Amino acid sequence: MFGLNKKDALLFLVVIGITLLAPFLLNPFPEGSGMAQFNAGYPDLLQRFAIYGIFAIGFNILFGLTGYLSFGHAAFLGVGSYAAVWMFKLFTYNVVPAIAFAVIIAAIFSVLIGYISLRRSGIYFAILTLAFAQMSFALAYSVLSNPKFNLTNGETGLQVYSNDLQMFHRTGLPDMPHIFGLSVRASYELELGAWSFTFNVGYYLCALIMLIAFYFAIRLFRSPFGMMLRAIKSNNTRMTYTGLNAKPYALAAFVISGMYAGLAGGLLAAMDPLAGAERMFWTASGEVVLMTILGGAGTLIGPVLGAGLIKYMENIVSKINDNVLHQWFAFLPDGMEDAVVALIHPFVGKGWHLTLGMIFVLVVIFLPGGLVEGGQRIARLFRGKKAREAEKSSQSNPAE
């Protein structure tokens, strides 16, 4: 099925199902209930799940398969966003050419950076990519915002104005990003009792592209090219001694990974036509590293899980303030309520990074393979339990 083996096809079908049903699955609590705080099925967050899932999948192709740790992938994310916004400003609000242009520009940019950075490996490669990303941030933040040739609009960010050229924009089309006339912000509301579900055009666009990107990653992982990338990670020196030149393969992986990042950047601009230099900052590069390691570097689904976890904490856990905590623990005596709130306060709201850091430490120590390894251990535990039960049953009912 889909040209995949049975195991990969099953995984792909599961991902398709979860992606399509996400507005239901991520809104488990009724509106107005105390637990509705934890619902994540609203369009803006769903879009971020899909977009940063694409970003992490692409990064995993470079880091998970090839073993090259890049601390500069945010440069391609930012370049993709700027390219998409310029397409909006000069030609049209249609997101299809904007996303295509973002991928092309990110590919060209990644060829230039990859060709230089891949002359070194290990920590030197990581530092080189970080340096290029910070130079890109500096260019976008100040140098390229010069009024004579304002390409980035500095700290304000690049955005679309009513007096922009927009050569192919015409009356009747939405004055915002759209898919051949259908606004990406268009939504359909479904009320089922106490539950409210929103189906958003922008989310399903991002979800469709994420599924295509995920499918391509599966095929790449299982291809001879993917095996060559694993060989580079396993023992680059031995590969060189066999007469194979690893650099073209590593550069190809770097460019593909950069194109994924540019695609994610273009989608960010398509959902909100604004591009800022902060998307190129080193913290954005560090975030995708965390996503990949938390989920499971070198696995197929791991980076998507890691991206979902971090974006969930950033958008949900960060909103839990003292007022919410007091509502939760109002049933306790006053002194005990204050003590419990004071105990939890450092780990939520503005302190959500502390919780994320603790999770990261625990995963690295106890689950080196990330969340995927945790799932595999639980699955093995249940399989072992079923096998033991089957063995006991056969012993108690021996065949005649």
Image (spheres, rainbow, N blue to C red):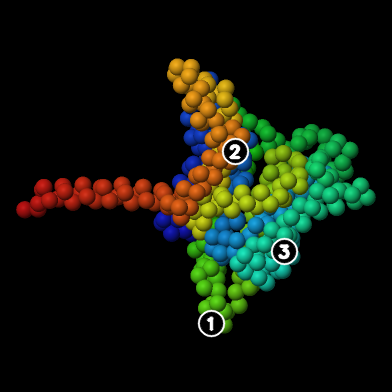
Q: In 3D space, how far apart are the residues under numbered discs 2 and 1 (Cα atoms)?
A: 47 Å
Q: Toward the viewer: 333 or 114?
A: 333
Q: Residues within 10 Å of mark 3 (few under 14, many from 20)?
A: many
- Identify the image quadrant of the N terminus: bottom left
On screen, 317 above or below 95? above
x, y percent for residue 165: 88, 43
Q: Residue at x 9, y 53 (%)?
A: 399
Residue on which the image places disc 2: 314
Q: Are marks 3 and 2 in contact (CB under 8 Å)?
A: no
Q: Residue at x 71, y 47 (%)?
A: 279
First reached walking from the N terminus: tag 2 or tag 1:
1
Of the numbered discs in the image, which one, if any, rests on residue 113?
Answer: 3
Of the numbered discs in the image, which one, if any, rests on residue 242?
Answer: 1
Quick one: which residue is furthest to the right in this view?
A: 148
Q: Is residue 313 visible?
A: yes
Q: In 3D space, how far apart are the residues under numbered discs 3 and 1 (Cα atoms)?
A: 27 Å
First reached walking from the N terminus: tag 3 or tag 2:
3
Q: Toward the viewer: 300 or 15?
A: 300
Of helix, strand and loop, which one carries label 1? loop
x, y percent for residue 221: 52, 62
Q: Are marks 2 and 1 in contact (CB under 8 Å)?
A: no
Q: Residue at x 55, y 30 (%)?
A: 345
